[in-house]
Image (cartoon, helix red, strand yellow):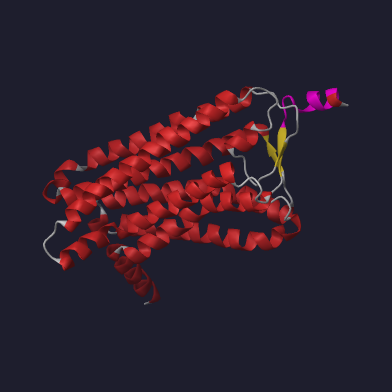
Amino acid sequence: MSDSNTTEFTNPSTFILLGIPGLEVAHVWISIPFSTMYVIAVLGNFTVLCIVKREPSLHAPMYYFLCMLAVTDLVLSTSILPKMLSIFWFNSREIDFSACLTQMYFIHCFSVMVSGILVAMALDRYVAICHPLRHSTILTNPLVAKIGLAVVLRSGMVILPYPILARQWPYCRTNVIPQPYCAHIAVVNLACADTRVSSYYGLFVLFYVTGLDGIFIAVSYTQILRTIFSLPTKDARLKTLGTCGSHIFVILAFYIPSLIMSLMDRFAQNVPLHFHVLIGNAYLLLPPVLNPIIYGVKTKEIRVRLLRLFTHTGA
């Protein structure tokens, strides 16, 4: 019996995604907030893209980076939600082996891309506040394009070993993934081989790539805050700090769930599996929902043009 199972799963043609383990009977109800989040993410990010495209006054580095973030959020949420909702609504749990690895690549690639874009946005805020007179000469359109290309290439190359390594492992235990999507560590844990290379590389990506991005953002904002608090008046300090508010909220929306996930994976082993899975979903899906809302509320230029858009539409 064991041999037949080994033969069956050595090169699985499909994986089985469980959705939210332990909460299968509530999948239809759970789908309601997730489908709502997806609609908000799609509408919100498309709205940001349309507003920036239509308004020549918003054709500036800050808004170019915001558009990159919106596109990344759209791809990230679309990589996860449609399959997740098909599990919740139609019990469609099977996913092709190659499709699973493709989904894994897109999820992790675009998560790293978000981190890189946040670094680029921090650089923009640093130059705008610490070197305001040189902002337009430093962050030219060609440089913004090069930064965007560098972010995309870095993400694509850094995550490429994930599916390459996962494809070469033998899978002789089971083909059941206790999640609604194909995460790297969830797939690798099913392998019946020494997968330390994949595990160590995953830690490298976490600490070297995301960690360095976090350090760069922290250093940038240290310099930004020093410049802000050296301004002569309180009004000037508040006004300048307000230009960073939306970016700070977006950073917190990305890094706080990530920190919670990392701590739970290492120190909260007694937490129910379904809670782990729900927090993991929140980590991936909340930022695409919150980012356009944060920028719509906190950024005056986008808020004004959004109100104008709806006013004209109503008229």
Task: Please name whichever residue, 4 or 137, is drawn nearer the observer in this view of the structure.
Answer: 4
Numbered disc total: 0
Residue 256 drawn above or below residue 120: below
Q: Residue at x 36, y 50 (%)?
A: 67
Task: Please name whichever residue, 313 or 217, is drawn nearer the observer in this view of the structure.
Answer: 217
Q: Is residue 29 magenta?
A: no
Q: Residue at x 34, y 73 (%)?
A: 312
Residue 244, quarter of the rendered image: bottom left
Question: What x and y, as percent, mark residue 40?
Answer: 50, 61
Q: Residue at x 30, y 68 (%)?
A: 304
Residue 8, quarter of the rendered image: top right
Question: What x and y, as percent, mark residue 173?
Answer: 75, 30
Q: Is residue 12 magenta?
A: yes
Question: What x and y, as percent, mark residue 29?
Answer: 68, 63
Task: Please name whichever residue, 57 or 115, is drawn nearer the observer in this view of the structure.
Answer: 115
Q: Main secondary structure of the magenta part?
A: helix
Query: Which residues make up the magenta segment?
Result: 3-13
Quadrant location of the C terminus in the rendered image: bottom left
Residue 91 falls left or right of residue 49: right
Residue 120 visible: no
Residue 3 visible: yes
Question: What x and y, as percent, mark residue 182?
Answer: 62, 40
Residue reaching furthest to the right = 1
Residue 5 drawn above or below residue 131: above
Residue reaching furthest to the bottom = 315
Residue 102 drawn above or below residue 80: above
